[in-house]
Image: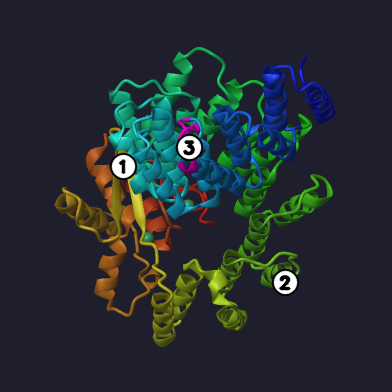
Amino acid sequence: MEITTMAQATQLHAQLLKNPQQNHSQTLTKIFNFTALSPSGNLTYARHILNSIQTSSSNSYFHNTMIRAYSDSPDPFQSISLFLTWHNNYIDDPFSPLPDRFTYPFVFKACSKLKLKRFGRQLHGLVLKSGLGPDTYIQNALISYYSNCDQMGCARKVFDKMSDRDVVSWTSVINGFVENKRHVEALRLFEKMETEGIEVNNVTVVWVLRACAETGALSVGMKLNEIVKNRGSKMEMNVVTGLIDMYSKCGCIDSAIRIFNEASDKDVYVWTAMISGLASHGRCKEAIELFERMERCDLKPDEKTMTAVLSACRNMGWINEGLSYFDKIKKVYKFRPTVQHYGCVVDLLARSGRLDDAEKFIKSMPVEPDSVLWRSLIWGCKVHGDTYRLERLIKHVEGLEMDDYDDCGTYVLLGNVYASNGKWKNKANMRKLMNKKGLVKPSGNSRIEVNGVMYEFTAGSTCHVEAGSIYEKLDEIDEVLKDNGYDPKLSEVLLEIDDEEKASQLLHHSEKLAVSFGLIKSEPGATIRIVKNLRSCEDCHSFMKHVSRVYKREILVRDRIRFHRFRNGECSCGDYW
Ligand code: ZN
Ligand code: ZN
């Protein structure tokens, strides 16, 4: 008989207890499995069964199942506590069974949920002592555990020492690197995985696609597309979503659209990926049209869909549409707007110069505004020259409990505002404060893929092997562009230095180094794709426009927020970013 409800389970259990002389072990196992593992089971009841059989038979199967069930429960600590009791029993009674290869993976799972770093390491020691060290199943669990606890070094060590790596081992370590934002390492591992002839599964594909999307590694992404296409079977929705996201983030929005159109039975994630892609490429009207089509398919948008829709409105400066979609989140789609949604609206209002409305909007929020919101508003004040409000806001932000504002973006912006007003002393104070808090301003870096290889540049760096020719070419480009109307915006340099030094600093921003390298290395006429970690500065933006016209190249720059497609001296963002 199949057990489907707790009522059935308890009834059956009562019957067994009435006839204790018979051997019921099979039925008991069935009852126990249901109570422990089924979503409609009951862990307390399962534990009750476990406790009742403990004396009669010390069965490790029951212990393992219970530990596994706890590791998936809202209270994973129970999993560890049961393990410890079991282990201590073994020390008292060496004839009882030991925790085995089916025990440790779930205890590690519990540790990773609870982020127990020290205990996890001790447990790892125990695994080695018990002779289970070389077990692939346990090693895979260890990789996941270390990755989840931000200890990629240890995860990698376990992986490197494995003699028998299966696709799960490779996928776990790649997944770990992606989750820890070490995308380039994830891509290298994928390359190695391929050379070793290990076949990828869908989970691997999804993680590697994510790494491609983040780094702009288009050629790897295309290879993955080939791999899944050659399998011939229908693509899973998470792979479709991954491909759409990868293509849009690598600048190939048309390929993303092709994948989207080819997919059938699209779920909300697929639609959302496509809407976000269109929005980030400045094809905002299409993004909104697609969203309306999605609604007609009776699919309910989620938080991410609405972020994409609102950012489309923001990119276009559509205030009324933006506000009306924002209203619909609560009234029609019935969920609470997130801080990202508020952020889009504040940004939309601030960019269009409706600073008063933006400020009122922030103050009306039911959730605590984060630093990004204040930053959008301060940035708006700076752009629209509202110095009175700017100074008032700066005082306000400075007075806030700054520990909540621990990302350094706000400090950097305040510093920039001070610098552009020539208030060097205030800027220096800001820097001191950042140093005291141990905040480091992220340095600008740009990546470019040439012939399938990824190159990374940081502002002013000279560590590239071809640095000499890159800088030489950059000087040449600079000359040519200046003859063609390019005028460097020295005001973008925020240091107290003379103009000549400013000009050289400006010329060595990372995306300029990348474009110089791109012009040297790629075929004439080929599109140059650059991924930048920060928002582009005004000067780099104008530089790229000139390069696209003078050198007759299409240049795609993805900055932290959106895409810029430079063609023939114009940018797809319409200089609104
Ligand atoms: Zn720049
Ligand atoms: Zn642009």
Q: Residue at x 64, y 20 (%)?
A: 264
Gap in angstroms between the C-alphas marked 1 and 3? 18 Å
Q: Earlier in the sequence, mark 2 or mark 3?
A: 3
| Element assignment for label 2 | helix
Q: Quadrant of residue 82?
A: top right
- Between discs 1 and 2, the one toward the N terminus: 1
State the quadrant of the N terminus: top right
Foreground mark, 1 or 3? 3
Residue name at image x 40 percent, y 31 percent:
169
Q: Is residue 42 left or right of residue 376?
A: right
Q: Secondary structure at mark 1?
A: helix
- Residue drawn at x 66%, y 31% is 53
* Image position, residue 568 (x, y; %): 41, 44
Give the residues drawn in magenta, as a range. Answer: 91-101
Magenta region includes residue 104: no
Kindly tell me whether mark 2's CB lies below 8 Å from ligand 2: no
Question: According to the image, label 3 marks what residue?
Answer: 104
Question: In front here: 424 or 64?
Answer: 64
Question: Seen from this angle, which residue lies furthest front?
Answer: 21
- Compute the Cα span from label 2 to label 3: 50 Å
Q: Horizontally, is 533 left or right of 472 in the view?
A: right
Q: Which residue is mark 1?
A: 157
Asked if the residues shown at circle 2 and circle 3 are in contact, with their CB atoms under 8 angstroms apart, the answer is no
Disc 2 residue type (three-letter): Lys
Would residue 369 be found to the left or right of residue 469 on screen?
A: right
Q: Secondary structure at mark 3?
A: helix
The dot on residue 363 is 2
The picture quadrant where one finds residue 492 is bottom left
